[in-house]
Image: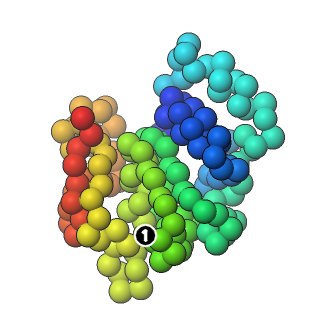
């Protein structure tokens, strides 16, 4: 579970040069960084001291106030985002308004929550890239995953490519 420290670092530093960023998590809980190492520990510590490091509640986010959505590589997405009705509303708005959405690595699982009124998937017909079943099988928590993104994407009418 959690958010990849390295992915978050890259996503945040690249996008903060062009956008005013708002970090949001389910319930506004602090970000649970995983895979913290010597190369990113200092940045993570510095980030936690900033005022913008306190996440907003995902439940209170109004998609109309934002221009882009970026979901970093977060192994926890299959647990708390893949079934989020709040994120689904945001994704539906972004899709309808043709606003850019970027999901990285395991963060692609977060897109699974978004369905249209007719129950079809918002991203039907899209092409997505994420962790393949082959990659997931090698993880110790594979048996407990609530969703296999590759299967969901293909079953929902989109194409899927595994990350290389």
- On the question of residue 56 being in view, the answer is yes
**Foreground pick, 4 / 22:** 22
The secondary element bearing badge 1 is classed as loop
Residue 31 location (% of width, % of height):
63, 40
| Image quadrant in which you'd find residue 51 | top right
Residue 164 location (% of width, % of height):
24, 35
Q: Residue at x 57, y 32 (%)?
A: 9
Q: Is residue 78 above or below residue 135?
A: below
Q: Is residue 107 left or right of residue 154?
A: right
Which residue is most to the front? 18
| Image quadrant in which you'd find residue 105 | top left
Q: Is residue 140 above or below residue 124?
A: above
Q: Residue at x 42, y 66 (%)?
A: 113
Within 10 Å of the Cα at label 1, are there few (<14), some (14-19), or many (20+) other Cα atoms?
Answer: many
- On the question of residue 85 being in view, the answer is no
Q: Is residue 109 above or below residue 96?
A: above
Residue 118 location (% of width, % of height):
35, 86
Residue corresponding to mark 1? 114
Count the numbered circles shown. Answer: 1
**Foreground pick, 65 / 79:** 65
| Image quadrant in which you'd find residue 133 | top left
Q: Residue at x 29, y 71 (%)?
A: 124
Q: Is residue 75 above or below residue 97?
A: above
């Amino acid at each position: 579970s959690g958010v990849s420290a390295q992915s978050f670092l890259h996503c945040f530093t690249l996008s903060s040069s062009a956008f005013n960023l708002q970090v949001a998590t389910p319930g506004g809980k602090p970000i649970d960084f995983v895979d913290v190492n010597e190369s990113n520990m200092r940045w993570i510590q510095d980030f936690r001291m900033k005022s913008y490091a306190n996440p907003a509640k995902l439940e209170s986010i109004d998609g109309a106030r934002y221009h882009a959505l970026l979901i970093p590589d977060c192994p926890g997405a299959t647990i708390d985002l893949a079934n989020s009705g709040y994120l689904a509303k945001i994704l539906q708005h972004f899709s309808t308004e043709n606003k850019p959405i970027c999901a990285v690595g395991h963060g692609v699982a977060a897109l699974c929550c978004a369905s249209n009124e007719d129950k079809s998937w918002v991203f039907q017909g899209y092409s997505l890239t994420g962790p393949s079943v082959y990659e997931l099988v090698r993880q110790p928590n594979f048996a407990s995953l609530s969703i296999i993104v590759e299967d969901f994407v293909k079953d929902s009418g989109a194409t899927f490519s595994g990350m290389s």
